[in-house]
Image (spheres, grey):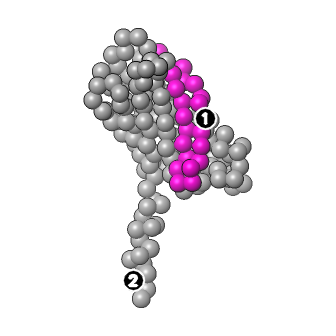
Amino acid sequence: MLILGLLFAAPYSFAHQQKSAISTVSFNPRTHSIEIMHRFRIHDAEHAVKHIFGKEADIIGSKKTQEQFSNYVRKHFSMFTADTALKLIDIGYENDGQFFWVYQETVEPAALKTLSIRHDSLQEIWPSQVNTVNIEGKGKLQTMIFDDSVESLEITF
C-alpha cells in the first residue's frame, strides 16, 4: 500500500520540482508594439517570494507582494537592439490561481533586424530554473531557452 501511495504522489511532487517560466514576446502589427507576457507557476512564485522578500511574503493574498514580484521580474528581463536597451513599459500583473502573469510592452523599433534578450528571473534562487521565451508575430516562431549558463541570446529576423 505504501508503494502505491508513493506512485500516486510521485507525479504531483515532480510537477512542483520543475522550476520554469514561459514568456511570450509578441509583435503586434496593428499597434506597432511588442507585447511581453511572463507566466510563472503560482507554486514556484509562492516559494520564490519567501526567498526574495522574506518568510511573510504572500503572492496569493498580498497586493504588496504581487507588486514586488512583478517589479522583480521586470528587473530580470530586458531586450536590446544593437546594444541599445528597449524601454519596457509595465502594463500590470495578475494571479489567475494557477499562474502569476507579468505584462510589459514597448514600441517596435523601425527596421528591426536583431533582438537580444536577457531573462534570469529566479536563477539566483534555483540554478535549475529554465526561462523559455517564445518570439512570435515577426516571421517564424523562434524560441530562446535561458538556464543558469545563459546570460543573453540574440535572434535575427
Residue 125 falls inside the magenta stretch? no
The answer to whether residue 123 is seen in the rendering is no
The magenta stretch spans which residues?
83-106
| Quadrant assignment, res 29 | top left
Count of number-bearing discs: 2
Q: Quadrant of the N terminus?
A: bottom left
**Residue 54 x/y as whole percent:** 69, 51
Q: CA distance from mark 1 to mark 2?
A: 44 Å
Residue 94 falls inside the magenta stretch? yes
Disc 1 is placed on an element classified as strand
Mark positioned earlier in the residue sequence (1 or 2) = 2
**Residue 2 x/y as whole percent:** 43, 86
The residue where tag 2 is placed is: 4
Instruction: Describe residue 17's horizontal placement relative to residue 87 as left or right.
Output: left
Give amino acid for label 2.
Leu
* Number of the label disc, if any, that sits on residue 92: 1
Q: How many neighbours does mark 2 have within 10 angstroms: few (below 14), some (14-19), or many (20 or more)?
A: few
